[in-house]
Image (cartoon, grey):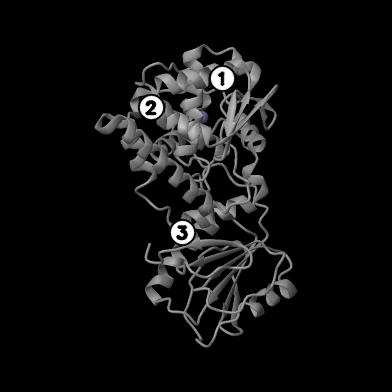
Amino acid sequence: MSKAYSNACVKMLTSQDIFFTDILYSLKIEELDCLEVNGNRVLACTDGTSIKFDTELFSKLTLFEAVFVLAHEVMHVALLHSLRRGGRNPMVWNIAADYAINGMLMGQRNMTMPKDGLYNPAYGRMSTEQIYELLMKDEKLISAIELNELADLIDYKGEDSIQELEGKTKQRVADAIAKSRKMYGDQSSSLLREIANIVLNQRTPWHKVLRQFMVSKDRTQNSWSRVNNRILQTRNLICPVRHNNTLRRVVIGVDCSGSITTTQLGRMSAHISDILKQCRPKDVTILYFDAKVLAEHTLEHRSYDVTLRAIGGGGTNFRPVFERVEQHYTDADVLIMFTDLYGDFPKSTSIPCAWVTGTETVKVPFGEVIYAELDD
Ligand SMILES: [Zn+2]
């Protein structure tokens, strides 16, 4: 560890709420001689599980600035910013998150925001989502921001599923808050109450998790350089940045043997339509199944209005669905299965797969499980 980093850690431990140090010490820390995010040199960045620092840039900060930067990155992790973005523009989301964090940290003692930090008192205590919506409407403000130095949120590409990581992070935040309350009693800061409200009192709805899953399968959506170029060229963010979709086919499997009601199917359809409109795959195919594939329906090219129906209703076998996709839909990039998970699984598959389910007790052999309250 560099001297600047160690000094900042000690200062943070002795001058700030134990919350920050507790989270920081639970993360993987990497110091690099030159830290770049998509070709731009940056001071620090995080993917929600680790924090990287540029040693040289970090050493140029004052001690109070360094403490602020550590706390800032910890806040990105604690507030799940890498996981909550969904289909939003990555750069604008990063900027909105920075405004939200810096607004929360501004009043804290013994830390100073570096002079190029983003702060606007007009945003008060708005959430990252609210600030994002405002930024998307404010072309002038976006144009005035120096883009290259801002990227400090990178996409999470680790082994845990998004929901697993979310669960672990929430536990980590809950533990750190509990530790702080133990140390300071009721004197524990209002900042921590704010963090608890944002992070602990809500479970991310299944459709947001599914959207993040789909986005993660679309390679170009994560490209900062493309987004930056586009913004630099047009300086126009009134419309969301158009996605350079590389998703070819999305296949949706609907388990007709379970207990999904017509009302729930209606809500699911609306959410899926929204997600598809954002991800814009070339084709969408829906397979209805129980013990076999009962019906298949491919949407018209580039139309994304899905209406799921309830048909059939025998025993459940997932294998015919995977066989059908492997044989007939070799261009499938994603398979989304809506099911209670009670059925026979294939041993393996090469298709990226998400299981959207209300069942928490069945272990799947592969793919990402997205727990869903289907009434959401
Ligand atoms: Zn940041």
Residue 96, relative to residue 205: is it above or below? above
Q: Amino acid at mark 3?
A: Trp
Against 300, residue 23 (above or below) is above
Classify the position of the C terminus by image quarter: bottom left
Q: Which residue is mark 1?
A: 6
Q: Residues within 10 Å of mark 2 (few under 14, many from 20)?
A: many
Is 176 drawn above or below residue 345 in the view shown?
A: above
Q: Which residue is mark 2?
A: 17
Label 2 secondary element: loop
Q: Provide the residue designation for mark 3.
A: 206
The amino acid beneath tag 1 is Ser
Residue at 59% across, 18% down:
58
For image coordinates 69% across by 77% down, the residue present is 324
What residue type is disc 2 on?
Answer: Asp
Rendered location of residue 276, percent (x, y): 55, 59
Structural distance between the alpha carbons of marks 2 and 1: 17 Å
